[in-house]
Amino acid sequence: MVKLPVAILGSGNIGTDLMYKVRRSALLELQLVAGIDPASEGLARARGLGFETCTDGIEGILRNGKIKLVFDATSARSHLAHAPRLKAANIFAVDLTPAAVGPGVIPVVNLQEYFTESNVNLISCGAQASVPIVAAINQVNRVQYAETVSTISSRSAGPGTRQNIDEFTRTTARSVREIGGAKQAKSIIVINPAEPPIIMRNTIYAVVDLPADEKKVRDSVMAMAEKIKCYVPGFKVTVEPFLDGDHFTVCNEVTGAGDFLASYAGNLDIITAAAINVAERYAETFSTGRKVSNG
């Protein structure tokens, strides 16, 4: 299979972590790492690994002429400007910002629905860790209300994350409804300054229609967790779903792979891992024309 030519737009922590993940992919070929800061550590690392770089952002990508897919790891505001230009150039965009120009995608839940789109959005780290759990519960018992709480280390919350807290909570809650299937939803993020840094932890509460089948819900959630672990090895259910009155509680944690980001930064790792999963499956469909499936 011929590798799919891709580029990374943004040379910060997310973009740099993506670079290491693309580097070991059997399906993706990194053509360019594009940034805007000539002194960027990410660009320096890319050059050190032998990758082409540029410092004029999207202009360098559009100039290349070979790139078929772009990971946008910049900011929500920047992606709003990038999206129409990438679409006009017939370049598939995997958006890791909260811009939500394209439909929200959770690889194990709804990826199949959106491969005819030109742009897909990875929503948020909290969504990637929590929405599949809500969806798994909803497959067995209708979820009337879901609440998700994501706790991350202060060290893994960069300026972009801090500036986009409102977008994080809104887009995550929306995805819990629209993708997870909950009738109503609320999402919360907690930035914990503890030292040593904690890994990402998520708690999901789901109020369901009664009677509820606790065993079937547990089996559904654990099966979903195994699918997630196929591309996020550090994902782990720490409290299996249990029924308390009318609601289920589930807890999970995410340890990062340590490609570039520290292992405690599971919140960043899960969204870069999801992005690679989307890109590799797009590469398979691009090369073979076969239909992609979730899971």
Image (cartoon, rainbow, N blue to C red):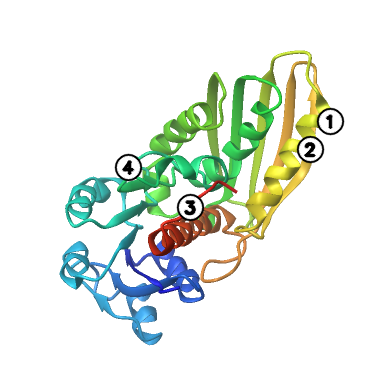
**Image height check: is 15 above or below 240?**
below
**Which tag is nearer the camera, tag 2 or tag 3?**
2
- Mark 4 or mark 1: which is in front? 1
What amino acid is at disc 2?
Asp
**Label whose residue precedes the other's in the sequence (2 or 3):** 3
What x and y, as percent, mark residue 171?
43, 34
Q: Position of residue 71 (x, y in %)?
A: 36, 59
What is the spatial separation of the Cα atoms under label 4 and label 1, in whole angstroms? Answer: 38 Å
- Which residue position is annotated with label 4? 99
The kind of residue tagged 4 is Ala
Q: As displayed, is residue 208 above or below residue 13? A: above
**Mark 3 surroundings within 10 Å by alpha-carbon count, few (fewer than 14), some (14 through 19), many (20 or more):** some
Residue under label 3: 157
Compare marks 2 and 4 and give the one earlier in the sequence: 4
Q: Secondary structure at mark 4?
A: loop
Task: Name the residue tied to disc 1.
Answer: 215
- Position of 8 compared to 20: left or right? left
Badge 2 element:
helix
Q: Are marks 2 and 1 in contact (CB under 8 Å)?
A: yes
Q: CA distance from mark 1 to mark 3?
A: 36 Å
Q: Residue at x 59, y 41 (%)?
A: 150
